[in-house]
Image: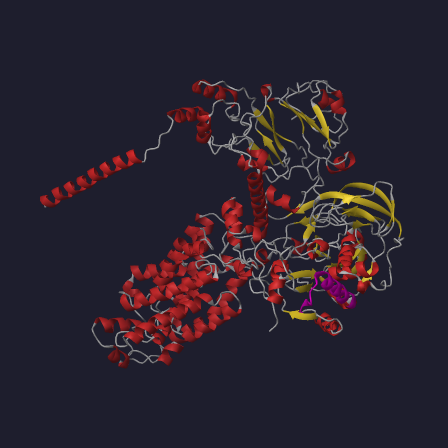
Amino acid sequence: MSDTLIFTIVVISAIGALSAVILYFVSQKFQVYEDPRIDEAEALLPASNCGSCGFAGCRAFAQACVAAENLSQLSCPVGGKETMKALADYLGLEAVTVASNTAIILCNGTCEFRPKTSKYEGVQTCRAISTVYGGETDCHYGCLGFGDCVPVCQFDAIHMNLSTGLPEVDDNKCNGCGACVTACPKMLMQLQKQMPKNRKVYVACRNKDKGPVASKACKVACTGCKKCATVCTFDAIEMESHLAFIDSYKCTLCRKCVSVCPSGSILEINFPVRKLKNEEVPVE
Amino acid sequence: MLKTFKLGGIHPQGEKLTAAMAIQPLQLPKEVVLPIAQHIGAPSTVVVKKGDLVKTGSVIALSSSPVSSNLHSPVSGKVVKIEESLDASGFKKKSVVIETEGDVWEDSISRDFPQTNFENLSSAAILEKIREAGIVGMGGASFPTHVKLEIPAGMKVDTLLINGVECEPFLTSDHRLMLEHGEEILKGTTLLMKVLNVEKAILGIEINKPDAILLLNKLAKNYPGIEVEALQIKYPQGSEKQLIQAMTGRLVAPGALPASVGVIVQNVGTAYAVYEAVAKNKPLIERVVTVTGKGLSNPGNFLVRIGTPISDLIKAAGGLPENTGKVIIGGPMMGKAIANLNIPVTKGMSGIVLLPVEAAARLNDVPCIRCARCVEGCPMNLEPYLLMALSEKGLWERAEAGHITDCMECGSCSYTCPSCRPVLDYIRSGKSQVGKIIQSRRNSASTDINTSIKPAIPE
Amino acid sequence: MSHLLTVSPSPHTKSDEIIPKIMRSVIVALIPVMVLSAIFFGLHSLRIMLAAVLACVFFEYSIQKFILKVPPTVRDGSAVITGLLLAFNLPAGLPVGLIVLGSLVAIGIAKLSFGGLGQNPFNPALVGRVFLLISFPVQMTTWTANITAADSFTGATPLGLLKEGIKSGKSLATLAGDAQIPGYLDMFWGNMSGSLGEISAVAIILGGVYLLWKKIITWHIPAAVLGSIFIFEGILWLIAPDRFMDPVFHLITGGVMLGAFFMATDLTTSPMTPLGKIIFGVGIGVITMCIRNFGAYPEGISFAILIMNGFTPLINAKIKPKRFGGK
C-alpha cells in the first residue's frame, strides 16, 4: 500500500520536474521581447477598447505610442487632453493638444413635428430600413428611430426617447469616441468640439431638400433661409444645399442664430432657461 | 419532361389575374416625372433646362458614360422643373419634370408603319439605333441593352435567349405582349441576332402561358433560327443565370457574364422595343405595365408613357381599394413596396401589385427550426439560414466566405421559411455591408494608403 | 385611405407551409403507425400514446409558462410529435409513471433547456427513450406479448433473441430455425414483439412516403440509413454467413425503419445540405450495425442517431453546398 503511494508521488513529481525543465527551455527559446513601457502606457489609457483612435484596442494604441517618434498623429478621443498629456509625459514626448469631442444628433424630427406617412415592416434596425427606402416619414434625411446608435455606444451615453422616437446623448457620459457616427446610416450623429458646461448650439437637421419640401415633411426642418448665416458675426455658419451648418470651432455660443431661426431647427442645449423673449425658442 | 433549372426554386401561386386582359393604352398624363437614373450604370446627363419645349421623342438626357442610357421625352410639352424626386427605388433621384401640352412627335419617328429596308441595316447601324433609343432591359433589371449587346473581347456568343418566362406571380405584361405583338417580338429577335451575329435564338416561355407558346411556335416557323421552348413553372426561372441553365444547360460562373458561356439573354419586352426602335425610329418612351390586385375593380395591362405617375394607372384600374395595405412596384417576389403613389413609371417597371391589408402584414417570426428549406430553395445554392445569422451578428468575413455576394435577392428563402423569418432582409443588409467592405479593400489596395494611423482631429 | 401603406422589403408573399402546418402533416404521416400499433397491442398502445402525448404537451406548456416565463408554443404541435415518437419507442407494458418521466426528460431537458423548438441539438424523443432505457433497463426490455401472438410467444424481440442466442453460443442456423423468430413477412407487417411504433415496416414506409410526397423530408437520410445498413450488413453476411444475419432481417427488425423515416429526419437535429444528410445517414447506419453486431445492446439505432446528432454541427460546418456555377 505504502509502496504504491510512494511510487505515485515519485512519478508525479518526476513528471512535474521534467515539465518544468521543458517549459523553462521553451520559454527561453521562444521569448519575445516586449517593451515594458507598453504595459505602463496601456495603464494610462481608458481601457475602453473602443477603437476610436483607429487601433484595434488600447494596447495596440499603446504600442503605437511607444513606437512613435511624436504624438502628432495619435490621439485618444475618449481620454482626451489629460490622458494624452499623461502619456506624453510618461514617454518623454510633447503632447499635442487635441480638443475633446461630444456627439450631437442632427435631427429633431419628433413624431409631433414629422408625421409618419408609411408603415415599415421588417427587421427593426436602421441599417435594414435604409436599404428599403428613405424612412417612414416624408423626410428622407432624418432619424429612422430604430436606434442602431444605442448598442454601439460603449459608454451607455445614447438612449432612445420613446416619446419623441429620437435618440438622446447623455453629455456627461459621452466621450466622443465616434462609434455612433459610423453606426448611423443617415449620418446624423456627428462629433463636435466640447464646449464649457457641455453647452451646444447646432442645427438639428440634415434635410437637403428645398425649403418648402423640407418644411412640408417636418415642421422643424432647416429650410435654408440663411437668416442664421446672416446674423452670425463669427462666420461660423456655412450654408450648403439648403442646409445650415454651425462650425463648433468658430461658434462662440452667442445664440443669435437660435433666435432668428424661423423653423426652430437650431437647438441650444445645456443653457439656462432664457428669461423673457418675444419669440418662442425650443429649449431642451 | 420540360426543361427547368437544377438547383433550388419555389412554386408560388400564379395569381395571373390579368392574363386575359388585352393591352389598353392609357391617356396622356398631365405631367411626367423622368428620373435620370432609370437604368443600371451612371445617371444620364440632362440636356434640357427649365422652360425648354420638347416634343414626344426628344432627347431629355444623354448617356454619360459607357454604361448609361439616353432618355427621351414621352410627351410633348414644357420642362417645368429639374428636381430631386421620389422614384420606385424608394429614394429621391434627380428627375426632369415635363408638363404635358400635347402629343406632337419628333419628325424622325414613323409612328404607325415601319420604315422600309430596316431589315437591311448593318449590325453596327442597328446597335447605334438601339443605343440612340435608350433601350434598357425591360424585365426589371434595366441594364442598358446596347452595352449588353457589345460582347467583351475574347468571348464568343452562339445563342440568343429571349426571356418570356415571367415567373413572378401576378405579372402578365410580357404574356400579353407576346400574344398581341408576337410578330414584332420575333422581328426584334431577328434584329438582335444580326447584331450579335448568331444563328440561333430560343424563346423561353413557361408552360403556364400555353396560348403564347402555341402562337409564337406558329409564328416562329417564318423566322429562321428562332425556336420556342416551353419550360416548367418554377420561380426564379426568369433570372438570367437560371434561364441559361434551364435552356442550354450551361453554368455561368459567379461574377461572370452570360457571354462567357456564349449566351446573351434579352427580355421579350426588350425585343419588342428593339423592333420599334430600329423599324420605326421610336425611342423607348412607353411600356406595358400590369396593374393588378384582388381588390381592384378593373385590373389590366396598360400601355403607358414612361414618367406617368402610378396614381394615374391605379385610377384607370378602378381606383385604390379602401383596404389596400401595400402597393408593390414589380412582382410580389422581388418588387419594391412604395410609400406613396406619386412615383413615376420607369423603363423597368413591369407591374403594380396591390395587396390588401391582411396580406400586407408579415407573420410573426419564430426561431429557425433548421429545416433546410431555404438551402433547398436557394437557386444559387447558398446557405441562407447561415448567412442570415452571420449578417445578424455582423460576422462579415464569414458571410463573405459563405458567398453572400452571390445572392440575387430572389426571396425564395424568405418565401419558404416555415418559421416566417425575415431571411432575405438580413442577407440583403449583410450583402450591402460585405459589398462595401470588398469595395474599400479594393480601394485601399489600389491607392495603397496606410490606413493604420488616423489623423488626429484638429484643434 | 384611413391607414398608412405598409412598406417592407421583398418578398411580399409567403408560402403557407409554416410550422403548424408542417407539424400537422407529420402527425398525419404517423397515423398508419398509430393504427397498426393499436391493432397489434390493443389498448396498451392507446394508453401509452395518450400518456406520452399528454405528458409532453403538459410539460411543454407548464415549463414555458411557469418556469421559463415565455409564451407557450404548444400550439405549433411539435410537443405532440415528440410525445408520439417517444410512445413509439416504448414497450407496450411500460407503467405510466415511467412514461411521464421520459416525457419530462424529452421535453424539459432535451428540448426546452436548449431554448425550445429549433435549438435542441439532440432528438428529444430519443433522449427520453435512451434515458429510460439506461435508467430502467428491465422495464424497458420487458416486451408485452403481441395480442395476435400464440401463447408460446415469449415476448422477446427478434433482435433480443438473436443477441441472447449468439451469447449462449447457438449457431445462426438453429436460431433462424427457432420458431420464436417470426417469418420475414410477419415481421414486415409488424407481427412481432417490440416497441409500439417500430414493429410494422409497412406502416412506417407508408408514413415516410407521405412525408416525402409532402416534401417535409428529403430522400437523402432514409436512403442513406437503409442503404448503408443493407450494404454494411450485406458485406458482413457475404463474408461470414454463419456469424451474421442477412441484411433484410436487420432492415425490418428493431427500430431501423422508424429511425430512418421519422427520427433521423427530425428537421432540427439533422444536417442542412444534401451531402451532409447522406453522410449523417451513413453514419447512423454504420453505427447501428456496429452496435447490433458487436455491441452489448441488441438494438442500436437510438444511440446511433443521437451520436450522429452530435456530429450535425460539425457536418454543417464542413459540408458546404457548391455555389451556383462554382468550382
Instruction: Give the vertical position of A33 relative to A128 (above or below).
Output: above
Q: Residue at x 70, y 63 (%)?
A: B197
Viewer can see residue C157:
no
Viewer can see residue B76:
yes
Residue B82 placement, left or right of C180: right
Residue C266 placement, left or right of B384: left
The stretch drawn in magenta includes residue C74: no
Q: Position of residue B326 (x, y in %)?
A: 69, 52
Between B324 and C289, the residue placed more toward the observer is: C289
Between A33 and B163, the residue placed more toward the observer is: A33
Between A21 and B297, the residue placed more toward the observer is: A21
Magenta segment boundaries in residue numbering: B183-207
Q: Position of residue A158 (x, y in %)?
A: 56, 32
Count of marks placed on residues: 0
Instruction: Give the vertical position of A94 relative to B376 (above or below).
Output: above
Q: Residue at x 77, y 35 (%)?
A: A210
Instruction: Give the vertical position of C280 relative to A230 (above or below).
Output: below
Q: Residue at x 83, y 41 (%)?
A: B49
Residue B367 placement, left or right of C300: right
Q: Position of residue A27 (x, y in %)?
A: 29, 35
Using the rendered view, name the quadrant where residue B141 is placed: bottom right
Q: Position of residue B210 (x, y in %)?
A: 70, 72
Instruction: Give the vertical position of C263 relative to B354 (above or below).
Output: below
